[in-house]
Amino acid sequence: MLALAILNGCAALDHGILNAQGPVASHERHLLLLVSGILLFVWVPVVILVPLIAWHYRRSNTNDAYRPKWAFSWTLEGFIWIPPIGIVVLLAILLWPATQRDDPYTRRAGQGEPVRVQAIALNWKWVFIYPGEGVATVNQLAVPAGRPIHVSLTSGTVMQSLLLPQLAGQVYAMAGMRTRMNFAVDRPGIFRGENTQFSGEKFAQQKFPVISMTGPAYAAWLARARGTGRPLDQRAWAALSRQNTTGPQTFSAVPPKFFDHVIAATGGASHPHAGHRSAMRKAS
Amino acid sequence: MSEPSLQHAGINMGGTENRPDANAESGIFGFWIFLMSDAVIFALLFAIYGTALAATAGGPTPAREFKLDSALAETLLLLTSSLTIGLTVLAMKYDETRRAVLAWMGLTFVLGIAFLALEGHDLATMFADGAYPTRSAFLSAFFALVPLHGIHVLAGCVWMLVMAAQIGAYGFDARVRINVLRLSLFWHFLDVIWIAILSVVYLQAHLP
Amino acid sequence: MNDRRRETLTYLTGFMLALALTLAAFAAVHWPVASAGTTLAIILGLGLVQVVVQFRCFLHISLARSSRDDLLLVLFSTLIVTLMVSGTLVILFNLRERMM
Amino acid sequence: MQTAYSPIWPAVLGRFTWHDLPFVRAWENPNASEIIGAGAASLVIIGFVITVALLTRYRRWGTLVEWVTSLDHKKIGIMYVAIALVMLSRAVVEAVLMRMQQAAAIGDPGFLSSDHFSQLFSTHGSIMVFFMAMPFLTGVINYVMPLQIGARDMAFPWANSVALSLTGGGAILMMVSLVVGRFSTGGWSGYPPYTGLAFSPDVGPDYWIWAVTLGSIGSTLGGINIACTIFKLRAPGMTYMRMPMFCWTSLCTSILMIFAMPPLTVATALLALDRYLGFHFFTNDLGGNMMNYANLFWLFGHPEVYILILPAFGIYSEVVSTFSSKELYGYVSLVLATMAIAVLSFTVWVHHFFTMGQSANINTVFGIATMTIGVPTGVKIYDWIWTMFRGEVRFSVPMLYSLAFMVTFVIGGFTGIILAIPPLDYVFHNTLFLVAHFHNMLIPGLLYGLLAGYTYWFPKAFGVRLNERWGRIAFACWVIGFYLAFMPLYVLGASGMARRTSEIFEPDFRPWLYVAGAGALVILCALASLVVQLVVSIRERDANRVFAGDPWDGRSLEWSTSSPPPEYNFAVIPHVDGRDPFYDGKRDNGHYRRHAHYDAISVPRNSVTSLSIGVAGLGAAFGLVWHMWWLAIIAVLGIVAALILRSFVRDTHRTIPAAEVAETEHRWHDALNAATPIGRDVEFTPRNQGLAETAA
Ligand code: HEO
Ligand code: HEM
Ligand SMILES: [Cu+2]
């Protein structure tokens, strides 16, 4: 039973960072293992010392000296303060460049021409626009393996967070604002993407596959998408904006600057008059 | 203990006794802590105001809404009332006559009410001009910060009425003294907050 | 000089100083001599000085032993308030820059 | 629906309709989720009715009134802890329901509706933090700290009672939300715009806002009171560097309360302005910006977690030193570490939103600041270890909790450091890894500490030792249950499972969710054992009395009084000349001295005004939630009136005549003389009457 549990457990871990499938995630996994290794020096002494000392100096053991007034030693103070400070300094030295490097805004991973994707969080689905290609998808993110993927995020509703556990960390998406995330996928395959920021009733279902393909397969996919003959028009957008869930969808065309329009419509700074109208409405 | 009299003006409870009253000391200190906690609230509202300055959403702007002349008048009123509340405390400490104390406190009260009237007039003008809190984040931040100070001033005025009644009923017993001291701290504190409002809200709106 | 006169003088000094500082701040805005940024710095500086004056003269916070507790409290509060306000401004302006 | 033709009902009942009653909902739509909701509501009502019936049957209304109007810090402390234990029970049951749902809802909707599940994590989190942990630690501080510094009461007994009644009002509002309407689904952090009017127009977020506001105002008042008491009311000779460690941590916690509760008050107040008056602080439109909310909330939220943990650290310090019969190792280091934690905790709040998009430089600075807190925390742990070193360790229940804490807490610190590294936080943020981290701090850190304190000081408060056997059973269940329930969450989090999910679509998560579910059931047993322990201890109270007052060979002043202590605490205010005044005193034979002459002592009288402020606060909150404006207005005026009335009251104190003090003291000294001093080997037996053998 236990063995089975552990076996199955490893299966669970396959869905996460330990089974990293992209350069960003790999770097994060490497950092995780390194930091954990260092932190063992924090954990092990305590776990050994606490039971050992408590048991050795138990009341019934009269073999050892009892020094009720002993309460200070400079040597011990040194051991108590200095190594932990050292560890923190070491971790800080690791942390600084790692944070710069994995900054989701600037990190450039992968090779070749970047693929630009604009992600819009809705209740309870993700819309992905490919401005360069003029197509859009819902609840599936198709990407070419190996190439850098540059995502701009916003939300058409409450705040959400886009996490790709095996590929990259997460970043929030907020209405009226634009955040960014960069990642790449090592090889073709299907990986999970999800919203991790609670957003209401069907939040648990707000997951989607990231489909990584070879270059030719991606090109073929794009061609197929353009050929579906279903543009992301007013009606389609109205349907998406409704609070519900949906399966994967593909749109063959997207109005230009659609993403900027969404940002402006949800209170973004670039469109000051959008706000004015609702103020009038409120005042009247 | 060279200058116990300066500790908090008037903290010595007895007429001649020089030992600060232990009870009064913790009573005043506790009130100080409360004021500092309140100061954090104001500080955060200032910070929010700072982040919301540009968020006018196409609506009224600071420069248009804030009038320097009435801000100056309000400042002078409040500053003077800070002086008069101080003189109230000194009167309580040295004269111990109800008339002197009530006179100074009455003057402070009038100045406070005048301040409130002026501020109320300002806010009404803003409303008439379409600058109401639901208009934009900037105005929301303004209407959280400045009227909160006004509410404090109002509370101070009510407090003065209560203290006047107590002075009438009990003279200057230990609790009246300690509460007048607290009231004066509160009032001075509001003056300090107003200086910040003046600089951050009103003067900043009219930078060259 | 008796206690009462001294204390009255403290209040009056505080009042005059505060008045002067306030008028100076208004003047800095009304008859500008410097750029917006500098003027802002000037009025905030004047405001800060005035706060110190008021604390000293009206609220009787001083370096004297007898008000050491109050002083420490005020200084600690200043530290926390500075941390909170400056942190908030830095973070939110940085966020605005990166998101708008 | 409401009748449109009669405008009177909306004016009276606000936005209340029949469908806000869970019974009506369960009747109309009888599924498991609604029935559980109706059941919970019935439990609240039945509990209330039974309490009223019992009070009437045994004619105890007088006692109740005597307690709730009391300004005695000891009674107030006990009432705080009582609130905490009741709320703990509710929140644990909710936690178990959530665990059961997640174990049942793998590729299946489970038995709870998604909406119900969201209310559960919101109430569980809010209750555990604001109405379990905060009252518990405030109660323990209230009870113990004045006794430890040799004071007769808190600096502001009346404000103390106001704080209690506001906290109680908040707790009652949480209970009311079970019976009328629904609670927020926005989690304990209540992030807008989700909790704003546009996305949650119902009463839920309003319940959250006002319950939390009542609690936080109560905590601010409590903090001011505690700090002022420690600053100004220490017994002569009790310098800062002679204060018991628990007083130091109480002081630092109270300072954190004073400065960290205001950001929360601002956050909830501005959210309320958005919701009630249409302001635009955190809305999506007209320039609103929710990032301000996140910033404000965590300006409070991070110091809050240290508010929670510091008193527990203080309790561990007392317990480890007492049950090792040894001076606390490294007192100065511990004091410095406590202060360092308190100050540093104001410099790290950004680590709760590393993923919001600020620059790498900002994240770096806050990441490093966060890790720095590990150093003073570690110092504390090592100091406790070296306190046991060369001591004589007795494995009492509080000591067992302390040992389990040290070993387990380090794991939580370990994962905290991982989360403090921004690139790693990008991966683990909002996953169950985070949930595991904070429960790993909150249960073995905070809750074990409070339970240790409860067991340790129970005999002080009631004069009766708690049953040892059931204590050990409860302890074992807490520890086993914790490991089973939360270690799997690290794995699930590392596999990318998001927090707050009511339904799971990944079959590979199943085994871990089962283990976690089993762990939750063990925790439920732990809770049950605590109840049994209390009942058994009350039953066999006569065998376990420790009236003499010192059952554990204690070190600080609270043990130098009778158990329970007299209303005035100390007939003669003690003089302190060391760090362990009582321990040293009784060994020098100086302590139990009968005086020939006692003075009359003045103690605060009971007060109704403080209670009425809490009641009015509850009324105002309820009125605001339901838009019953008349109620809110009346209640707020009531609060103002109570404040003014109180300032007119002159006869606030009552004098206990010298004869009565003398009689109380003589009765205690007679008992001391009659008691047999016992050695530590028999301290868990009925022979322990509370007098410690001090020879050798
Ligand atoms: C009592 C509660 C408590 C405590 C004490 C802590 C302590 C710590 N916490 Fe935790 N936390 C707590 C409760 C929470 N934390 C949270 C979230 C949280 C997050 C945000 C994660 C995210 O949202 O993505 C981070 C980065 C941390 C880090 C830390 C660190 C570094 C510590 C340190 O203080 C730990 C220090 C201890 C250590 C390190 C072990 C002992 C030290 C030794 C042995 C010495 C040597 C050590 C070193 C050299 C490192 N916490 C949340 C989330 C709330 C929410 O989102 O809902 C809660 C409730
Ligand atoms: C006693 C055993 C406990 C169990 C079994 C338990 C279980 C849970 C569960 C299942 C969740 C929801 C996790 C999710 O989001 O998926 C949760 C959330 C939470 N718990 Fe506990 N918990 C326990 C004790 C505590 C204690 C003692 C505290 C605090 C003092 C606490 C504070 C919280 C908080 C703050 C949340 C987050 C709520 C939110 O998401 O807004 N819990 N807990
Ligand atoms: Cu934190």
Image (cartoon, coloured by chain):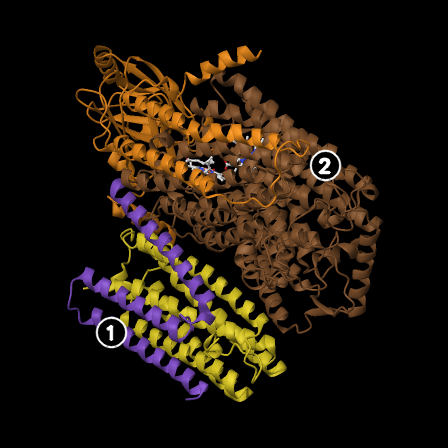
Give the drawing colour for chain A.
Answer: orange
Q: For the image shown, how many numbered marks are present on the structure?
A: 2
- Do the residues at pointers 1 and 2 share their chain? no
Give the quadrant of residue D448: top right
Callout 2 secondary element: helix
Question: Is residue B91 or residue B142 the one in the foreground?
Answer: B91
Which hue belongs to chain C? purple
Chain coloured brown in this rendering:
D
Residue D280, given in percent of the width and then of the height, sits at 38, 50
Label 2 CA crowd tier, 10 Å (few <14, some 14–19, many 20+): some
Q: Position of residue D344 (x, y in %)?
A: 41, 47
Residue at the disc numbered 2: D531
Q: Position of residue D33 (x, y in %)?
A: 61, 29
Q: Find ligand 2 in the image and state its quadrant.
A: top right
Residue at (65%, 64%) from the top-left corner?
A: D609
Label at residue A220:
none
Colour seen for chain B: yellow
Residue for badge 1:
C24
Q: Residue at x 36, y 58 (%)?
A: B46
Could you tell me which quadrant the C terminus of chain A lies in? Answer: bottom left
Question: In the displayed structure, does residue D216 sit left or right of residue D28?
Answer: left
Query: Label 2 amino acid?
Result: Val
- Looking at the rendered structure, the secondary structure element under dot 1 is helix
Q: Nearer the viewer, residue A54 or A155?
A: A54
Amino acid at pointer 1? Ala
Drawn side of residue D516 relative to residue C16, left or right:
right
Q: Is mark 1 within 8 Å of ligand 3?
A: no
Residue A198 seen: no
